[in-house]
Amino acid sequence: MLIQQPQSRLSFALLILGIILIASNLRAPVTGLAPVLDQIILSFNLSASQAGMLTTLPLIAFALASPLATSLAKRQGLEVSLFIALILIGLGLASRMIDSVPILYLGTVVIGVGIAIGNVLLPSLIKRDFAHKVAVMTSAYVLAMGIFGGSYSALIIPLAEYKQIGWQIALASYALITLLSLFIWLPQLKLRTKPTKDLVENTDEVKVWHQALAWQITLLLGCNSLFTYIIIGWLPSILIDSGFNAQQAGALQGSFQVASALPGIILIPLLAKLKDQRVLTFALGVLASLSSIGLLYMPVHAFVWSITMGFCSGACFILGLSFISLRTHDSHQAAALSGMAQCIGYLLAATGPIIAGALHSYFGNWTSTLWFCASASALSAMFGYLGGRNITIRNKA
């Protein structure tokens, strides 16, 4: 495959800006729901489990729509497919203006499908145009996801209260960022580059599903995602029940998201020097577990716990993704493991917000939910220790 290179500094700058803006749409439209979740529950008289579905539906969409992203890219090319992803996200955001529970759920699914396409295809685009700067560009777009997601979570309550515009307009307003992203991405549509061979190669013959190490890495990512999406979905509600107001709770959830993006700056250069990551991954999982317990019994220090949980969550995520490359022999095996981890990980994460909401409804408090989070992080520590060994998956099952 011929590599398409930008023809000028301007087109190169527009490509980088386009990637950053696409990344800005891959978290905030989902995580922005959490700070206004109590208002949504009151508006539509939802149960906690029904509200938890709003956080769960995108994760189900991630798991189910991710394989479709590759097929779309094979037909339309990476550039057009990413443009379609932005259109879907924008339509889902705009639908939040409609005062209807089914439309709210449907719009959330549409957003999830758009984000799934972006999540799958953006790394392939970076591999194409930034082959020698993959780590730097990956860190940049993960950081953008965290900063935009965190800022939006922190600002959405003040925005909803501004002249009483309400939560629906506040949620839909993020479509302005999506619209800007579409405009900046327009110059890339003249290209129809197919995804990298690693992404489309048939890897069914690589039997990673039968191997213990593959499951250890998959469950590290899955348990960490389970913990992460419970916190993203319910942290504001947990904090409000602990005595914080809605604006403070939104800001703290924002700090969690920003902190989750920071490990990329530290870990990616560090990983090149570490052959064995057992102790590091185990320590991060244990620290996340202790922070969940700290939030339960010492909520006065919620800022410290939010930052710590966010940092540990992001670090375990980056380590898990790194293990996919470090523990495999070749690109085909890595692609197979990535597909396995993504499918199982998102499906496992999808259960988290629903279980958290159900536990709260049954016990009438967040104690069981936070202990559930602590347990998920403890499992991440265990699977991270096993997955962090300096070994590789066998070539044959």
Image (cartoon, rainbow, N blue to C red):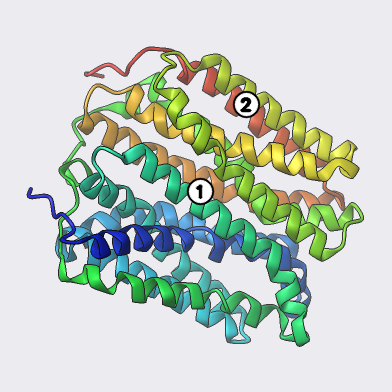
The residue at 77%/68% (across/down) is 38
Q: Quadrant of residue 42?
A: bottom right
Q: Position of residue 87 (x, y in %)?
A: 37, 75
The residue at 68%/24% (across/down) is 286
Which amino acid, by three-letter code, is at mark 2?
Leu
> Would you say 331 lies left or right of 274 here?
left
Near-viewer residue (41 or 17): 17
> Would you say 248 lies left or right of 118 here?
right
Q: Quadrant of residue 377?
A: top right
Q: Position of residue 108 (x, y in %)?
A: 52, 69
Q: Calculate the distance from the C-alpha at mark 1 to the C-alpha at mark 2.
A: 19 Å
Which amino acid, by three-letter code, is at mark 1?
Leu
Q: Position of residue 297 (x, y in %)?
A: 89, 37
Q: Number of callouts in the render?
A: 2
Q: Residue furthest left?
A: 2
Residue bearing the label numbered 2: 284
Give yes or no for contact between labels 1 and 2 (Cβ–Cβ under 8 Å): no
The residue at 47%/41% (across/down) is 345
Q: Residues within 10 Å of mark 1 (few under 14, many from 20)?
A: many
Residue bearing the label numbered 1: 143
Near-viewer residue (56 or 23): 23
* Rendered position, 237 above or below 102: above
Q: Does label 1 or label 2 sit earlier along the sequence?
A: 1
